[in-house]
Amino acid sequence: MSGTEQGRRSTRSERTRRALMEVAVDLIAGGGVSAATPAAVASSAGVSRTALLYHFPDRPGFLQALANHLAGEMARLFDASGRLPPGVDASDHAIDTYWALLQEPVFKVFVELRAAARGDAEVAAAISGLLADFDSGRLGGRFGAVSQAGEDPRSQTSRDLGRFLLEGLALGGLTYDADDRRRRLIGVVKRAVRGLNRKGATQDLWPG
């Protein structure tokens, strides 16, 4: 086989693997981890079950490839969101940006996998490295953490507060006045982070 033919096959193989990962993301984002069965992934990607098994012979390998795909896509989205517009507060921008990112399918899948990992050892093993990179901020690129602060406990707490409140809000089921309640909650998150970053006072948490 010529080098050119090998290159073509390699390119086709990479395209197929990426298509399978993108389909898995769509399935999990829409229906949870259980929706991404081998049959559903293969069918949605337009390949045979045999082709799926050729690329991913077992579940741990498939899950690890999915975690690697998520890491790359999340880093790309973080990096694209990292530029601070002129005159905008850095922590406010980071909070707005992270909230928008949490609506992206890859971030929804990340949340689904974290939940599934509590009772699934194979999922837990596959995403352990991704979790560590995400929690430490290594995945963020130019976006950085939820605030442009230092590494002292107060600064770390401001980042964690913003991050976990936003992630909880993304999972919460607001059944009435959702837009107004969400807007008020995000406003409180911003003011709380500013207070921890010494940009505001604790009495500013709720506007007068």
Image: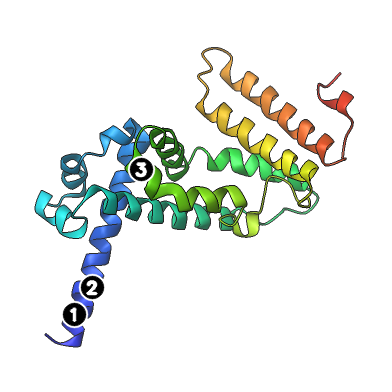
Q: Is residue 126 above or below residue 8?
A: above
Q: Residue at x 14, y 52 (%)?
A: 47
Q: Which residue is mark 1?
A: 6
Q: Which residue is mark 2?
A: 10
- Cβ–Cβ under 8 Å for marks 1 and 2: yes
The image position of residue 17, as x and y in percent, is 26, 59
User: Which numbered disc, 3 or 2, marks the residue that appears first in the sequence?
Assistant: 2
Amino acid under label 3?
Val
Image-based side of 26 in relation to 45, left or right? right
Q: Residue at x 64, y 54 (%)?
A: 143
The image position of residue 72, as x and y in percent, is 45, 58
Q: Is residue 128 above or below residue 113?
A: below
- 167 and 103: which is toward the camera: 167
Secondary structure found at label 3: helix
Image-based side of 182 in relation to 148, left or right? left
For the residues labelled 3 and 2, the Cα–Cα distance comes to: 28 Å
- 173 and 126: which is toward the camera: 126
Amino acid under label 2?
Ser
Q: Which residue is mark 3?
A: 123
